[in-house]
């Protein structure tokens, strides 16, 4: 065997003379010899979908490697992975074409390979496939927040330029070149970018740590994520580019001012023409549209989380403790029998059962089957491939899974008795339509030349693999007939299952001091982990939406305030000729309403398009859900109109005499 660096340090103290040492290991009669030590940090793991052990952990380092010794016939099964290294200069397409030629040649020599199509994928893509599905949409959400922030910076710089246009005009009249003004305004925006980027880099270090805590198991290998310099520099560069782009328009405007016209003008120094106001309105509408897209995404994921919490899984996860139990020596049957008896006797425990394939853990055997009443298959690979679970008697009662026909497993269903199985309703309806499945024969793992297995019960459908997928056909075997090395112990308690965690582990070790007990969780925690990706995405999108909403509301407030300041003379004249305060408020409020309505309409279109990127995360709701769209649109519009209260009140309090005198 070759051992991992971490195991070498943890169990062997980094012994430099470890090569040649024999190690006793479970499931092997002959102790293997250590022939090498791998470098630190190696994570050469299969994808989670191919994991077959209950204690499989995609985030774990590899402890050891051993030579694969498989039955040649079993090696034809479709769940094996082959890893290769491309020649220098070779592409995936070339390798894929070559594999197809090899597969076609193999099919001529072995009919089992007929119609087999090899799949080829870069190893990095395979490792990151699950993470990419969540990270790319979240990256897009972060980019939308950046665009909204850039819009705010551009609006603020433009307003600042309006306030300083007299200064720019005087400097131009005194001989300052326009390129100098352009450089000055650009440098101001660059300075803002440098300060903001420095603050962002500082925040990023802490935020990444916070994300790692929040995400938990949502993103594979998240523990290896760090704020390395290339990422920080890239983020810093994006901030600078964004600020420069945001400051480009104000800089161009400052360099193109008509100095004489401004000097002759007697208007207020903070005034803005229709062109500037129109531009600011367009920026604000764009911010509102992008914010609604984020709010739509957050709303859809929150509805998904709510739907998943209410979905009928077909089993009860409350008050159940789950842990992986592995007996590494002694009599297998004796340990498991005594363990169930001892754990069931613990005060507060209502029942206990061992199981391979506990719901939502991702574990089951991939098995091939033929069924009575169905024509024999021509090739082994044509047999039905189904998930196989193996449980002890009482398992279905512990999970409150109803047996609708037949009976449960019994302690007498041992290896010496006839092989029996329990199937779910989906399997019974598919392979035995219009008749009872009880008593029907099933041939597994080798075709009809093997002894048949009799179906003795039908259990109600349940979402054991994924809460978001409808029940699929599956088959249960008796653990006493189809034993598993590593398996889970499920314990139903009368109160909080966490109260008996220590007692259960202590009892197991009293039965066998060498037993390995891992992954101790409640089944509610297992259920939460199964939807962790969607929960994490919802939490981040809610956070992004809050930030974006604040920025957009600031933009709406700023544009409306500038509009009031620009129309100060108009409002004063209206007041002087008899307009009441409520008339002025209606005038300004109507302006705000048009601004917000334009943003909401644009946001509906943008949200409808961008929300499709979340389609793979949604459950029980469409990406174009009208109810969610209307809800977030109305909520944002109401809050935005409330943000217009201060500018509206300020407009109604303008003193016409003072305003006209300043003109």
Image (spheres, rainbow, N blue to C red):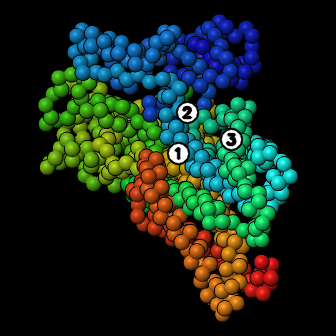
In the rendered view of the protein, which quadrant contains the C terminus? bottom right
Q: Is residue 108 left or right of residue 244?
A: left
**Residue 426 visible in the snapshot:** yes
* Real-space CA distance between mark 1 and mark 3, rounded to the nearest whole angstrom: 22 Å
> Is residue 600 or residue 487 the one in the foreground?
600
- The residue carrying mark 2 is 58
260 is higher (above) or lower (below) than 518: below
- The residue carrying mark 3 is 241
> Which numbered disc covers residue 137?
1
135 is higher (above) or lower (below) than 545: above
> Is residue 175 or residue 312 the one in the foreground?
175
In the rendered view of the protein, which quadrant contains the N terminus? top right
Q: Residue furthest top?
A: 20
Name which of mark 1 and mark 2 comes first in the sequence: 2
**Residue 398 visible in the snapshot:** no
For image coordinates 66% across by 93% down, the residue present is 578
Q: Is residue 172 left or right of residue 572?
A: right
Which quadrant holds residue 121?
top left
345 is higher (above) or lower (below) than 565: above
């Amino acid at each position: 065997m070759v051992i991992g660096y971490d195991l070498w340090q943890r169990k062997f103290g980094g012994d430099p003379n470890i090569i040649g040492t024999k190690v006793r290991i479970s499931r092997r009669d002959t102790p293997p010899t250590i022939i090498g030590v791998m470098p630190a940090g190696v994570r050469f793991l299969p994808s989670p979908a191919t994991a077959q052990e209950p204690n499989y952990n995609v985030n774990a380092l590899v402890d050891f490697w051993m030579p694969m010794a498989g039955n040649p016939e079993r090696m034809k099964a479709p769940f094996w992975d082959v890893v290769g290294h491309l020649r220098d200069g070779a592409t995936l397409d070339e390798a894929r074409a070559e594999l197809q030629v090899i597969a076609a040649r193999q099919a001529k020599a072995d009919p089992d390979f007929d119609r087999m199509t090899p799949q080829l994928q870069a190893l990095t893509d395979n490792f990151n496939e699950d993470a990419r599905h969540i990270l790319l949409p979240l990256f897009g959400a972060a980019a939308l927040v950046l665009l909204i922030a850039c819009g705010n910076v551009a609006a603020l710089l433009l307003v600042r330029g309006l306030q300083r246009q007299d200064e720019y005009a005087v400097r131009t009249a005194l001989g300052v070149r326009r390129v100098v003004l352009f450089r000055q305004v650009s440098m101001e925006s660059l300075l803002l970018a440098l300060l903001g980027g420095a603050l962002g880099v500082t925040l990023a270090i802490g935020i990444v740590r916070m994300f790692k805590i929040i995400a938990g198991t949502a993103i594979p290998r998240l523990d290896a994520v760090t704020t390395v310099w290339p990422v920080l520099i890239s983020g810093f560069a994006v901030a600078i580019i964004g600020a420069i782009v945001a400051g480009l328009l104000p800089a161009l405007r400052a360099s193109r001012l008509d100095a004489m016209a401004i000097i002759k003008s007697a208007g207020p120094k903070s005034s803005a023409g229709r062109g500037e106001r129109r531009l600011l309105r367009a920026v604000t509408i764009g911010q509102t549209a992008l914010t609604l897209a984020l709010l739509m995404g957050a709303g859809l994921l929150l509805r998904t989380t709510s739907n998943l919490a209410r979905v009928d899984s077909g089993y009860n996860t409350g008050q159940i403790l789950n842990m992986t139990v592995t007996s590494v020596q002694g009599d297998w049957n004796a340990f498991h029998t005594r363990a169930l008896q001892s754990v069931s006797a613990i005060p507060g425990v209502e029942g206990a059962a061992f199981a391979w394939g506990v719901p939502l853990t991702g574990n089951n055997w991939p098995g091939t089957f033929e069924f009575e009443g169905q024509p024999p298959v021509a090739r082994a690979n044509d047999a039905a491939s189904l998930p196989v679970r193996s449980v002890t008697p009482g398992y279905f009662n512990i999970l409150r899974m109803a047996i609708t026909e037949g009976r449960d497993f019994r302690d007498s269903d041992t290896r010496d008795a006839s092989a029996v199985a329990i199937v779910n309703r989906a399997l019974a309806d598919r392979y035995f339509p219009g008749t009872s499945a009880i008593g029907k024969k099933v041939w597994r793992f080798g075709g009809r030349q093997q002894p048949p297995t009799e179906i003795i019960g039908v259990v109600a459908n349940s979402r054991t693999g994924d809460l978001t997928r409808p029940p699929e056909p599956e088959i249960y075997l008796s653990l006493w007939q189809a034993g598993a090395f590593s398996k889970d112990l499920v314990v139903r308690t009368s109160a909080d299952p966490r109260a008996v965690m220590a007692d259960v582990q202590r009892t197991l070790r009293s039965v066998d001091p060498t037993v390995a007990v891992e992954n101790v969780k409640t089944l509610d925690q297992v259920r939460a982990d199964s939807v962790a990706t969607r929960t994490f995405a919802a939490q981040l999108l809610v956070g992004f939406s809050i930030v974006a909403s604040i920025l957009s509301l600031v933009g709406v407030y700023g544009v409306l305030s500038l509009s009031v300041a620009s129309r100060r003379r108009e409002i004063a004249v209206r007041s002087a000729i008899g307009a009441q305060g409520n008339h002025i408020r209606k005038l300004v409020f109507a302006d705000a309403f048009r601004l917000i309505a334009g943003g909401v309409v644009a946001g509906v279109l943008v949200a409808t398009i961008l929300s499709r990127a979340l389609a793979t995360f949604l459950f029980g709701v469409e990406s174009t859900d009208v109810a969610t769209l209307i809800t977030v649109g109305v909520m944002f519009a109401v809050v935005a109109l409330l943000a217009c209260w201060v500018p509206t009140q300020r407009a109604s309090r303008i003193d016409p005499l003072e305003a006209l005198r300043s003109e």
